[in-house]
Amino acid sequence: RLVLGIETSCDETGAAVLDETGQILGESLHSQKEVHLRTGGIIPTVAQQLHRENIERVVHEALQRSNVDADQLSAVATTVKPGLALSLGIGLEFSQRFVRKHNKPFIPIHHMEAHALTVRMLQPVAFPFLVLLVSGGHSLLAVARGVDDFLLLGHTLDEAPGDTLDKVARRLSLIKHPQCSTLSGGQAIELLAKDGDRTRFRFRTPMGQTHNCCFSFAGLRNQVTMAIMKKEAEEGIRQGSLLSCVNDIAAATQHTIASHLAKRTHRAILFCKANSLLPERNPTLVLSGGVASNQYIRKALSIVTEMTGLHLLCPPAKFCTDNGVMIAWNGVERLREGKGILPPDVDVFYEPKAPLGADITAEVEAAAIRLPS
Ligand code: ATP
Ligand code: MG
Ligand code: FE
């Protein structure tokens, strides 16, 4: 059985064909990263136009590379939520025309469910497991209990950590930095932080007094911006031209984000243990999303998992970011269980906002679990 997966929820146009064992027969990915880097952020109409220009080619390339005819497919799986409305619309519209033309079942995919399940394509990981997803658009902690069965323990109340890193990088004009001109904000900050002293700037770890598993990064970004403004004023220089202490600011920002993620995850693990939500044998934390490729953040989480006796799994970077492969894999998993498979003629709508699974964030907060100091 073969599944074609299509992804257009944000800024990558991706397609891939997988067989039911998870072998990638062929894939194609067009990233808009460079364009958005130049405009200093994603402009939805620009993203939509780029998806429109590339979707046909990307899908056909994936089919061609896998040596598969549309007629040989068992189903088409496409991201329909959550994401940018204009971007989701292009992939969905293309897919609905495609499945009708070739008379194939359609599997609508939740983008975060796909991120959470990708690890199972690479190695056997049994349900239930804990997952921390951190990217440019999301930050969440959930228990994956089954292919379409998630408990949402926490999510971001404002922005996502990747977004924060991108905005701090932009405020520091890191794109003009010789080493960073082609890097995303998160990559630039990780690189600069290597030569920085994280103790020269002190930022408060967010939500220290709130004993739940939610995240907040907007306040941290504000603290960082204030520190940058102060330095710029002291040195009497133009906005975004700071050079002297960018490494230290990068290191402190990265450290605070890592510490916030580690603390929320630590509490989530304790909550899971108190409520027997994870197996006694080999309990696992899966870390994924674009921000998960950050080594400093991985290290911080590995300290937490070691302390609590969990096994930490983190897919290689190319499977942590958006692509067609993860969507196709989610399709394979759903096809195998016969979950959410629609006939080609059913009208499906996209949903820009869609929580993952059952939201138990209030229950987690009510448990008011305190972390050992
Ligand atoms: P989403 O998956 O939520 O729809 P997205 O497309 O922005 O959004 P990804 O493609 O998974 O998410 O990841 C991109 C984000 O990851 C960017 O914000 C980028 O700054 C961040 N990122 C990439 N590499 C690193 C790194 N080494 N350290 C920290 N952040 C990183
Ligand atoms: Mg992306
Ligand atoms: Fe994503």
Image: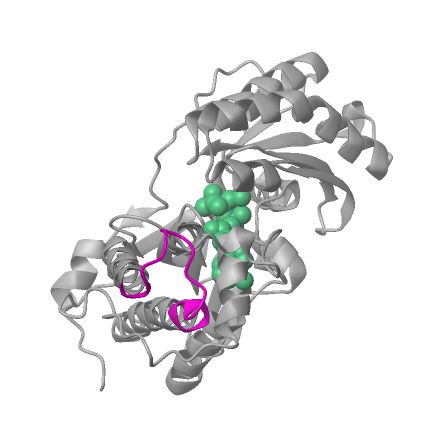
Q: Find the residue positioned furthest to the front.
A: 236
Rendered position, 242 above or below 104? below
Q: Which residues are magenta?
A: 234-249
- Horizontal relation, residue 95 to residue 67: left or right: left
The residue shown at (50%, 27%) is: 87
The answer, for residue 215, to whether it is visible in the render is no
- Horizontal relation, residue 225 to residue 112: left or right: left
Question: Which residue occupies the foreground of this view, 344 or 292?
Answer: 292
x, y (%) of residue 84?
Answer: 43, 31
Q: How many marks?
A: 0
Q: Main secondary structure of the magenta part?
A: loop
- Horizontal relation, residue 193 to residue 181: left or right: left
Question: Which residue occupies the foreground of this view, 336 or 269?
Answer: 269
Q: Find the residue positioned furthest to the right.
A: 67
x, y (%) of residue 48?
Answer: 53, 24
x, y (%) of residue 181?
Answer: 60, 52
The quadrant holding residue 241 is bottom left
Question: Which residue occupies the foreground of this view, 103 or 286?
Answer: 286
The residue shown at (30%, 53%) is: 155
Question: Which residue occupies the foreground of this view, 286 or 337?
Answer: 286
Q: Is residue 241 magenta?
A: yes
x, y (%) of residue 314?
Answer: 56, 66
The residue shown at (79%, 31%) is: 61
The answer, for residue 204, to whether it is visible in the render is yes
Which quadrant of the rendered structure holds the N terminus?
top right
Rendered position, 173 above or below 245? above
